[in-house]
Amino acid sequence: MLKLTRLNGEKIFINPELIEYLEETPDTVITLTTGKKFVVRESVARISGQMINLKKQMFLNLKK
C-alpha cells in the first residue's frame, strides 16, 4: 500500500495495483481503475518511486 497525504493533511493508503494514471496539474491527481480520484501532496515522481520500491520488495521476497 502507498501511504499518501491529501491536501488537508489526512493520511490515506492506496493500493498501487488500482492506480490507472497519475497527473500533475500542478497538484498530483491519482485516478484509480474504479474512476475514483484523489488529490495528494506527494509528487508524481515520489509516488512512482514508491511504487517501484514496493514492486522490488515483492519480487525480491519471491526469490527466498
Image (cartoon, rainbow, N blue to C red):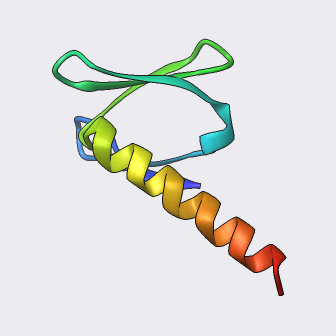
33 displayed left or right of 40: right
Picture layout, residue 6 above or below residue 23: below
Locate residue 50: give its quadrant.
bottom left
Residue 63 appears in the rendering: yes
Of the 4 image quadrants, the one containing the N terminus is: bottom right
Residue extending farthest left: 26
Locate residue 3: give its quadrant.
bottom left
Residue 2 versus residue 50: which sits nearer the camera? Answer: 50
Of the 4 image quadrants, the one containing the C terminus is: bottom right
Picture layout, residue 44 above or below residue 2: above
In the rendered image, residue 18, in percent from the top left (x then y), is placed at: 66, 32
Residue extending farthest bottom: 64
Locate residue 48: give its quadrant.
top left
In the rendered image, residue 59, in percent from the top left (x then y), is placed at: 73, 67
Picture layout, residue 24 above or below residue 61: above
8 displayed left or right of 40: left
Identify which residue is drawn at 68% across, 39% down. 17
Residue extending farthest front: 63
Identify which residue is drawn at 82% across, 74% down. 62
Residue 41 versus residue 54: which sits nearer the camera? Answer: 54
In the rendered image, residue 39, in percent from the top left (x then y), is placed at: 33, 26
Identify which residue is drawn at 63% across, 71% down. 57
9 displayed left or right of 23: left
In the rendered image, residue 46, in percent from the top left (x then y), is placed at: 31, 49
Numbered label tally: 0
Residue 11 appears in the rendering: no
